[in-house]
Amino acid sequence: MGGRKYYKKIFKEIKREKFDFPVVFELFTPLTDEFADDLKNTFYHYNLEMSPEDASEYVRYNIGKGYTNVQLVDSIEKALTHNCEKFDIFFMIGLGKQKKENVYKTLQYIDSLLEKFENKDKKKIYPFISPYAPTLDPGCIAFEDPEKYGYKVIYRTLEEQYEAFKNPSWKQFFNYKTEYMDAEDIVNLTYQSAMRMTDIKEKHGLMKREDAERIRKNIEISEKIMKRIDEIKDKNGNAGLLKDDLLNKWKKMCRIRIYR
């Protein structure tokens, strides 16, 4: 981020000092041949990560990511031919201008991307998909100009958000909804995507069967508990939740990472 001259100087000093430590670089723009060469010639061990957010270039452009799927694939290929040990790719749910169909197509794209590198070391490519944070950050451009970027802000004050965080379910934390999805949609898509992503990773050898089965079970339990919480809340309000032992199970489930 300091520019070409800056990183060249830093890389030169690292190489001169013969530092041997693993590093991770996040790419905000497509990987160039020059930077790939510099990474290979400087570091013994390095990983890269990139966040295209959605397979749709239209959705991606709306959040300021101005590169194509062709450039994404080209970046992965460059990385693999320049000794990159792992390439993480991050996608998100709940973006402005994003529809449910975009999420489904993104999951298909992830599957096809892994298939594309079937004959190379596909285990170096590791995709993720997860929901956007349940709050738009005050001060960010989407919070200040939500309609332009496909959002509607629900809670604008600290007090409103503080009260929302007292709710028992993360579905009730959201301070926004998008042009095409509300919190209910985003939460449901999160569980669906977690299940589908588990299938994809198992299919491509990125996850062992026993690990995949454990994650599927956790997802199912989490969905059932959330549904039960909704039922209790609709019937008795938040006070009824405090008397239900499922709340403790829910809190435990919230600590389980279901995306990996």
Image: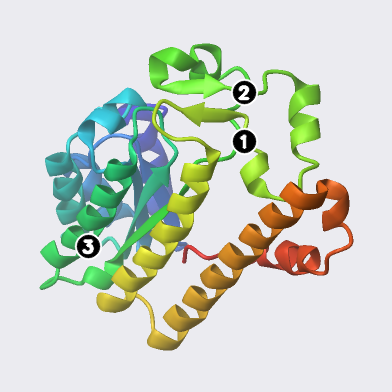
Disc 3 residue type (three-letter): Asp
User: Taking 167 as reference, is 67 above or below it?
Assistant: above
Quarter of image, res 54: top left
Decide which of 69, 171 is in the foreground and name it.
171
Q: Residues within 10 Å of mark 3 (few under 14, many from 20)?
A: some
Q: Are marks 2 and 1 in contact (CB under 8 Å)?
A: yes
Residue 107: give x, y in percent of width and height.
28, 55
**Mark positioned earlier in the residue sequence (3 or 1):** 3
Decide which of 171, 243 is in the foreground and name it.
243
Residue indicated by mark 3: 111
- Front tag of 2 and 3: 2
Q: Name the secondary structure under disc 1.
A: loop
Residue at 76% in and 67% down:
246
Residue at 47% in and 43% down:
185
Is residue 18 at least partly visible in the picture?
no
User: Taking 168 as reference, is 148 above or below it?
Assistant: above
Residue indicated by mark 2: 154
Q: CA distance from mark 3 to mark 1?
A: 29 Å
Quadrant location of the N terminus in the rendered image: top left
Disc 1 residue type (three-letter): Phe
Q: CA distance from mark 2 to mark 1?
A: 8 Å
